[in-house]
Image (tube, helix red, strand yellow):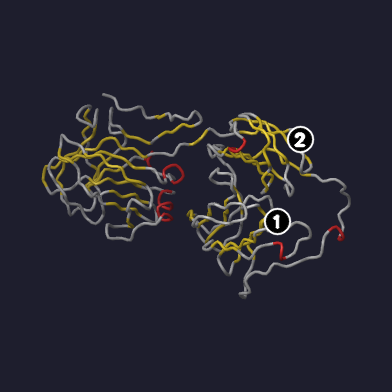
Amino acid sequence: MMKKILLLFLMAPLFLQAQITSTFDTDADGWTFLNSSTSLPLVHTSTGGNPGGHVKVTYSANINTSTQSWIAPAKFLGNQAMRSLDMNLLFDLQQSQAGTNSNGNGDIRIESNSTNLVYSLPAKPAVAPGWSSYSLKLDETQGWRLSSTTGALATRTQIIAVLSNVTAIEIRGTYATNATYTSGIDNVVLEQRALPLAIAITSFSSLSGEPGTTLTINGNNFDAAIANNAVYFGSMAGTITSASTTQLSVTIPISAQYGPITVINKVTGSSVLSGKPFNPTFAGGGRIITASFKPRFDILLDATPGNDINGLVAADLDGDGWSDLLATESALASVSIFRNLGSGGNLSAASFAPKFSLASSGVGNGLFTFDLDGDGKLDVITTNASSFTTYRNTSTPGNLSFELVEFWANPIVGIASEVVDVDGDG
């Protein structure tokens, strides 16, 4: 009997979810079995699985041998962080006789170039013809350890680093010492996060406009409810006055910035930047001279010798309609935020709240704000030595708050240069 079709369609019409699977209904699907460094011949059987076909191997098993394991094919490897973080790795195992042993290498190993995740199954596989089904969550709550079963518990950052470059997945076959031991495997699934159909901007009513006037944005896959969309002119959100799946009307905000317009569907989490920049204008303009500006004022940073600014951004982080100031301070390895109090009138140091710090950002170059998770709030992105760092924004008007920093490994020193949708998936 054939198993469930590999492409699963979710109830929501805008989502498609594909899982990486091996059902073993027709063949071994690229899996191998290593006994130390020797690849053993597999037997594929079209019946006896859980249900349908499965693969098995018979060999001289020894619980003290480091590697007597099923090895995943290439389709399970590579960068799986975005699609499989917080999802599950599922598989079915059986053994020819009751065995409850394993060793320090663990029963499941997910390897990368620098770090290995290890997990020991609390209940060992059923004796054939029975099957044991396993589901392991790919996050910090599952109890993954580093390198061995006695290693430290893996943090979320370490799990992200491994999933960003998976070089091997090993599922142990040996749980008893026996000269004619048989291990069977079936139904391996690496769950993949559902990705929405990407939204698109096809045009907008004008390439320029004054704050307070209305701009019409045409496109596809917007949400029909006003509250479920967000539109940014640089780092300032506009006020949406009407919405359909193909058109948004939005009031251009004060402090709108020159550049692409960003539209976010907060239901699907999909976002898109316009292909053309928008130019905010103002009435009564003319020649810009020194007298066009008020006198300078200073906002003091940390006085540590050698402290420097590696990035400076103005963005409305708390959604109150006023631009806040962000700076990376090299001596503190942090992002400093000065919330705009929204008093209006002439600007001074008193126009901003005391410094709010995001720790552990690192001292790399570059600082950006962008809605990474599609919730309508601008998240913070910077760099930290050999990684880039993200802070998910959970602020509300008048109150700054962020989730703990997450680190995303880079092979070289981190320099944040831009945030763009490279593959067009939203």
State the image coordinates of residue 256 (x, y, percent, origin top left).
73, 47
- Local packing at callout 1 (Cα closer than 10 Å; few below 14, some 14-19, many 20+) is some
Which of disc 2 and disc 1 is earlier in sequence? 2
269 up-or-down from 312: above or below? above
Percent x, y for residue 83? 44, 42
Q: Return the x and y of residue 129 as percentages of the image width and height.
A: 15, 34
In the shown orientation, is residue 33 left or right of residue 113? left
Q: Residue furthest top?
A: 1
Q: CA distance from mark 1 to mark 2?
A: 29 Å
The quarter of the displayed image where residue 113 is located: bottom left
Q: Secondary structure at mark 1?
A: loop
Q: Residue at x 68, y 62 (%)?
A: 352
| Residue at the (59%, 47%) spot, across then down | 377
Q: Which quadrant would the C terminus be assigned to in this image? A: top right
Can you tell which mark lies on residue 325?
Answer: none
Determine whether, in the image, residue 411 is placed left or right of residue 42.
Answer: right
Per the image, label 2 sits on a secondary structure element best described as loop
Name the residue: 62% across, 65% down. Answer: 355
Residue type, mark 1 in image: Gly
Q: Residues within 10 Å of mark 2 (few under 14, many from 20)?
A: few
Residue behind mark 1: 342
**Residue nearest the viewer, comparing 339 with 96:** 339
**Is 298 displayed left or right of 166 in the figure?**
right
Q: Tag on residue 206?
A: 2
Q: In the picture, which quadrant includes the N terminus?
A: top left
**Which residue occupies 78% across, 40% down?**
209
